[in-house]
Amino acid sequence: MAFFTAVSGMNAASKNLDVTSNNIANANTVGFKESRAEFSDVYAASVSGVSSIQAGTGVRVANVAQQFTQGNINATGNNLDLAISGDGFFSLGSSATSDQPTAFTRDGEFKLDKEGYVVNNQGLYLMTFKPNGTTVAAGFSTGVLQPLQVKANQGSPTATSTIGVSSNLQSTQVTPTATTVDPAVPNSYNHSTSLTIYDSQGNSHIATTYYVSQSPTTPNTWNTYLFVDGKPINTDGTAAPLPLDGSQSFKTMTFDTAGNLTTVMPLAYGPIDSTTLDPNLNVDPLSLTFDFTGTTQYSSVFSVNNLAQNGFPSGNLVGIDIDDSGVVYAKYSNGKAETLGQVALSRFPNPQGLAKLGDTTWAQSADSGERIVGAPGTGSFGKIQSGAVEASNVDLTSELVRLIIGQQAYQANAQAISVEKTVTESILNIR
C-alpha cells in the first residue's frame, strides 16, 4: 500500500509543480491571475467505520483555485488600455450585435478594429451601457448593453442657428459722430464682438456684431448691427446697400436705470440667403437668433463674459478619453466631444467558480453564480484607469519558493518508494 501512497504524493507534487510553473510562465501576462493547488488527504473506506489506527492512503488534488487578488497597475500611455482598480471584470461580447457578454476578463488591452469597434486581442467586443444622448448629462441605459463603437467622423455639419452673447456695454459711451456703421472706421461704433459661425455645408463665416450707443439722445439704449464676412446684413437677412448709406436695419437693446437688460430675447436675423454671403455658395439660408441674456450696462469697461454658437463643421476623430467612471468620450477635430457609452463591469458571488476559457478570459458557471452588472465606481465595483493595464498578480519570489518546496515533496515521495522497494526486497529474500 505504501507504494500507492507515495505515488499519489508524487502525482500531487507533480500537479503542484505544474501549477507553479504555469504561474511563473505567466508572470508577465497582463490580467493573469495566479492559481493555487489545493490538496486533501485520502482514507480507505472501512466497513467498521473510522479507526484510530487507520493509516491514510495518500493525497489527491482537491482543486486548482485561481486567486483574484489585485495586480499592480502599470501605465502604458495608450488611452484604450484599461485597468480595473478594485472588484469587477470587463464584459466581452462575441459579435458586433451582442447584447449580452459571453466572456469576462481583467486584461484591459483594447484596440480599434477596422469597423471602429473596441476589441481585445482575441477579437471579443468590449461591452458598454448605451448612452441616452451625446452628453453625460443625458445618462445611460444601464439595462442595455452594446459593443463600444467609435465613429471616425462626427457626421454631417450643423448650421449655426443660435448665438449667445453676454457682455458689459460701458454706460458712459455716447453716440459716435459717424452716422453710418463702418468696420473700417473705428469711431463709427462703440463696441464689437466677433465669432465663427457655420452654414449647412460646414463652411465657416465670421459674424460680427457692432454696438452703437444712443446716449445721450436716448439713454440706456443700444443699436446692434450685424456683419457677416464683412458684409452688412439687414434684420430680414438681405444685404444692406454698399457703399454704406445708413439704411442698414438693426436691432435695439434697452436697459433699466440699474443697467439690467429689459429687451425680451432672442433677437432674430434672417433668413440670410447664401448668395448674400458668396455668389458661389449653394447652401441653406442662415437664420440666426441672438440671445444677449446676461448683458449689462455698467460704468466699467467693455468686456465679454460669454460668446458662443451652436453650429459646427464635420470633424475627424482625434482622440478617445475614458474617465474613472468608465464614461467613453470621442474627441473630434471640430472641437466637439461625444459620449459613446459607459464601460459595463461584471462581478460574481464566487469568482473562483468561473470557468477558465484561456486567453485570460472566464465564463459564468453554476459555481460562480449569476453575474452582477454595474458601472465603475458604483457599489462595490472598482474604478477604471485609462492608459494603464493590470499586471499579473504572480509574485515570482513566492513562486520560486513553492517550486523548491514542490521539488522536495516530489523527491521525498520518490524516496518513500525506494524505501518501500528495499523493504519489499528484504521480505522476498527471507529464506
Image (spheres, rainbow, N blue to C red):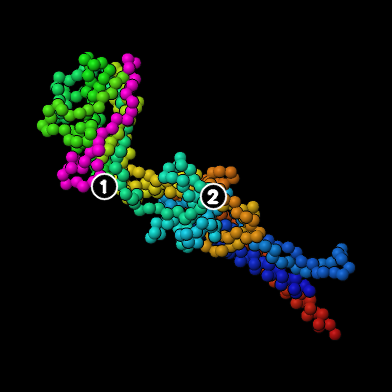
Q: In this view, does 348 lie to the left or right of 298?
A: right
Identify the mark nearer the N-term, 1 or 2.
2
Q: Position of residue 235 (x, y in %)?
A: 23, 32
Q: Where is residue 89 in the image (x, y as percent from the top left)?
A: 55, 53
Q: Is residue 257 magenta?
A: yes
Residue sitting at x 33%, y 28%: 265
Q: Is mark 2 on a helix, strand or loop?
A: strand
Relative to 325, say whether 264 is above or below: above
Q: Mark 2 sits on what residue?
A: 143
Q: Position of residue 366 (x, y in %)?
A: 65, 60
Q: Could you tell me how far apart the alpha carbons at marks 1 and 2 are, in whole angstroms?
A: 37 Å
What is the quadrant of residue 14 in the picture? Answer: bottom right
Query: Does the rendering let one see residue 397?
Result: no
Relative to 171, say whether 358 is above or below: below
Q: What residue type is labelled 1?
A: Gln
Which contiguous range is marked in magenta? Answer: 256-285
Answer yes or no: do the residues labelled 1 and 2 have beta carbons within 8 Å?
no
Residue sitting at x 87%, y 70%: 47
Q: Which of 124 and 142 is in front in this view?
A: 142
Q: What element carries label 1?
A: loop
Q: Which of 132 and 345 is in front in this view?
A: 132
Marking on residue 8 = none
Q: Mark 1 sits on what residue?
A: 201
Q: Does the magenta stretch include residue 85?
A: no
Relative to 250, say whether 173 is above or below: above
Residue count near mark 2 (Cα–Cα under 10 Å), binned few <14, some 14–19, many ≥20: few
Q: What residue type is labelled 2?
A: Gly
Q: In this view, does 257 lie to the left or right of 245?
A: right
Secondary structure predominantly adopted by residues drawn in magenta: loop
Q: Is residue 107 left or right of residue 149?
A: right
On the rendered image, what quadrant is the N terminus found in? bottom right
